[in-house]
Amino acid sequence: MKHTDHRLEWVAMSLPDLEIDALRAFVTVAEAGGFTAAADRLGRTQSAVSVKIKKLEEVLGRRVFERTSRSLALTHDGELLLGYARRLLDLNDETVRRFAEPAAEGELRLGVAEYFLSDHLPHVLGRFAKLHPRLHIDVRVGMCSDLVTALDTGDLDLVISRRDVGDSRGRGIWTEPMRWVAAPGLEIPQDGPLPFCALPAPCVFRNRGLAALGAAGRAWRVVYTSGSVMGVQAAVRAGLGVAVLSESSIPDGVRRLGPEDGLPELGEVEMAIFGETPRNRRLAEPLVGFILDSLAALRPARPQLALASRDAA
């Protein structure tokens, strides 16, 4: 038995350690689609990122990217590594944040606009709860107008919601594009009215979409109205029509549309946090920071992209 224990100890000692910096460089290259874009995000030179990737490949004894003069793609081993790397980075960041940040303690009644992080919010809040077990968050998800009213009447402490252009109230925390979305098999009519799925008025996504269609002289008809973003997402997946959603609320299994499909640009929507006071800011700051970090991590990976030759370093 002791012989077996010594053998296992020797095997464990012989395994190399993966560097967190190298894994972060690898994930960033995969998500950004190239070395140049990854270097910009990491604040490093392209050559430094390339060196990190090469060292990672040497440690693993496997190639993680296929490089040519014109393209870059994850190898099969690279695709396998991507999942492990993300989990390791999440654990690393969670550990560092847990010890670096002061412990937040108290209760916070938080309202969140339904279309903001709609598919990911429960997971994000679950991870946050593990980091801050003494901060109890009572979350209410709803429409912007209802949440702001609840904030004004004292039923909520903080609200993360849309901020209109020119509105000085609140603190802007996130800006993201609005997108036209549709089911993969839906044919976009070129002559007839565009079938439109939307939230009920007043809604910034409904208003922005219909205003853009009107300005472009494009005919439309509302075919489905739902009081929830999940209902609109379901209608889009079912192929009933197109919809306007924020980038963070686009579900899997749908396609993004744009000018190439004959649809006008929609611009961006700004999310802001409302209700901050000196008293609750110490509770709000770690939560908002965690949400923003999680949003940045949700950028989709692009394992098969054709890149400029300078990115295939």
Image: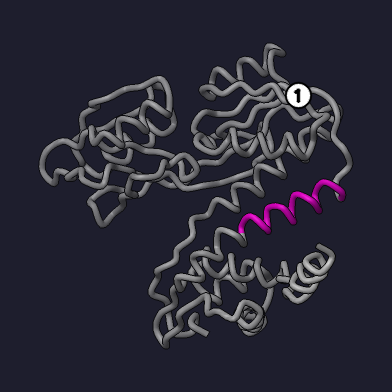
Establish if 313 lies above or below 87. below
Q: Does the magenta stretch include residue 126?
A: no
The image shows residue 81 at horizontal and vertical percentages of 56, 65
- Locate the N terminus and report the quarter of the image it occupies: bottom right
The image shows residue 258 at horizontal and vertical percentages of 31, 52
Residue at x 67%, y 82% (from the top left corner): 48
User: In the displayed structure, does residue 37 sit left or right of residue 49?
Assistant: left
Residue at x 79%, y 51% (from the top left corner): 95
Give the number of marks: 1
Q: What element carries label 1?
A: strand
The image shows residue 90 at horizontal and vertical percentages of 68, 53
User: In the displayed structure, does residue 21 sit left or right of residue 218?
Assistant: right
Residue at x 59%, y 53% (from the top left corner): 297
- Residue at the outermost bottom position: 69
Residue extent of the magenta highlight = 86-99
Residue at x 73%, y 34% (from the top left corner): 129
Q: Which amino acid does label 1 sit on?
A: Leu
User: In the displayed structure, does residue 186 sit left or right of residue 179?
Assistant: left
Name the residue carrying label 1.
108
User: In the displayed structure, does residue 183 sit left or right of residue 42?
Assistant: left
Q: Does the magenta stretch include residue 95?
A: yes
Magenta residues, dominant SS class: helix
Q: Which of 36 and 8 is in front in this view?
A: 8
Establish if 183 lies above or below 133. below
The image shows residue 60 at horizontal and vertical percentages of 62, 77
